[in-house]
Image (tube, rainbow, N blue to C red):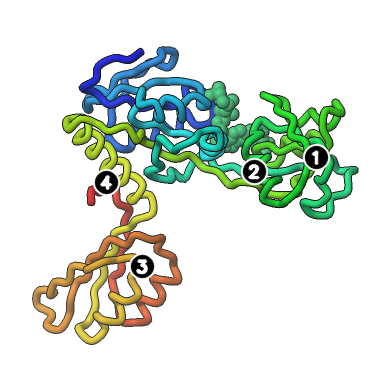
Amino acid sequence: MLADRSRLHIALQKSGRLSDLSRELLRDAGFRIQSSKNSLTARVENFPAELMFVRDDDIPTFVSDGVCEFGIVGENVLEEFALGENEQRYEVLAELGFGRCSLKLAAPESLAFDGPRSLAGARIATSYPRITARYLADQGIDATVVKMNGAVELAPRLQIANFICDLVSTGATLEANGLRPVETVLDSQAVLIRTRKPLDQKRAEIAAGLLSRVDGVLATKESKYIMLNATEESLEQITAILPGAEAPTIVPLHGRPGHFAVHAVCQESVFWETLQKLKGAGASAILVVPIEKMMM
Ligand code: PRT
Ligand code: ZN
């Protein structure tokens, strides 16, 4: 699997909840991925990188060992891995805003729960034994963690455990199994990680290119381009209202002395409320447009 060392290797989940969105992020960053849903690797046609499709649980190991320089994985999987390591051999570069879920403690509807102390002496089934054990230690609770690799929500019914600690997004699975969430142990989303193993100069340059493109995609998700007209007196107030805009461009309007056009990239969401405030401060002809690409 260790192919061409002049290319970067990016570990993505082969199939599962993160796989489509991970590929979509790379596509939005302008990478043309050879279509090969069933293959273990795919070349990026227009960038010196190769994708490796693996189980999500293997991604932290691959990146820590430097087999892949980059990877996209859920914080839940990453944290469980990190708790079993002596030193952190990867770094988190960016939160990607997808794959959101929470690791929650859940109890059968019939079981009373009166805060974490209700867990004392109980058995808790989970696929995340290290995160669960850390939570219990933080709370000063003595309980038994039972590791299961799947179907955790069945554990109380099978009398394997009293409680479970499992990932929840909509909560429908818990409900269908007569369980209710009682405590949140960890909030998670997909993150981009990078190996701490040093890269040679060529691959360090390629890595910087990859990062700047991904940063660009993440920035444009929230960003908007605002254009408006303003009088000279209102400029100061208007530029103060523009959300997350640094150094707007201000140019005089032809044939209208004392009037200016203000253009700015706003790094935060622009709400109707903001537009009303701008209008109130003297802005007119306000346009808000999406940004397709951005490189800082
Ligand atoms: O085969 P591989 O090992 O790669 O995949 P996997 O089966 O281990 O993982 P997969 O594809 O199910 O999830 C990959 C990642 O998606 C997880 O590690 C999380 O970071 C993230 N994620 C986001 C979720 C969920 N939401 C989620 N709801 N992972 C799992 N679930 C499961 C949960 O375990 C439970 O069974 O969905 C069920 C609950 O969903 P709701 O909507 O009913 O609450
Ligand atoms: Zn997995």
What is the CA distance from the residue labelled 2 to the residue labelled 4? 42 Å
Which percent across, then down, holds residue 165? 71, 38
Q: In this rendering, which labeled residue sits more in front, label 2 or label 4?
A: 2
User: In the figure, residue 246 lies in which quadrant?
Assistant: bottom left
Q: In this rendering, which labeled residue sits more in front, label 1 or label 3?
A: 1
Are the two marked residues, 2 and 4, in contact with CB atoms closer than 8 angstroms?
no
**Sooner in the amino-acid sequence: mark 2 or mark 1:** 2
Q: Nearer the viewer, residue 201 or 219?
A: 201
**Sooner in the amino-acid sequence: mark 2 or mark 4:** 2
What is the CA distance from the residue labelled 3 to the residue labelled 4? 19 Å
Which percent across, then down, holds residue 18? 49, 31
Q: Nearer the viewer, residue 50 or 149?
A: 149
**Sooner in the amino-acid sequence: mark 3 or mark 2:** 2
What is the CA distance from the residue labelled 2 to the residue labelled 1? 23 Å
Q: Residue at x 41, y 75 (%)?
A: 276
Tell whether circle 4 marks a residue whose Cβ is less than 8 angstroms from ligand 1: no
Q: Nearer the viewer, residue 82 or 44?
A: 82
**Sooner in the amino-acid sequence: mark 1 or mark 3:** 1
Q: Which residue is mark 2?
A: 134
Neighbour tally class for label 1: few under 14, some 14-19, many 20 plus, Cα within 10 Å: many
Q: In this rendering, which labeled residue sits more in front, label 3 or label 2?
A: 2
Q: Which residue is mark 4?
A: 293
Q: Which residue is mark 3?
A: 243
Q: Amino acid at mark 2?
A: Arg
What is the CA distance from the residue labelled 1 to the residue labelled 4? 44 Å
Q: Which residue is mark 1?
A: 179
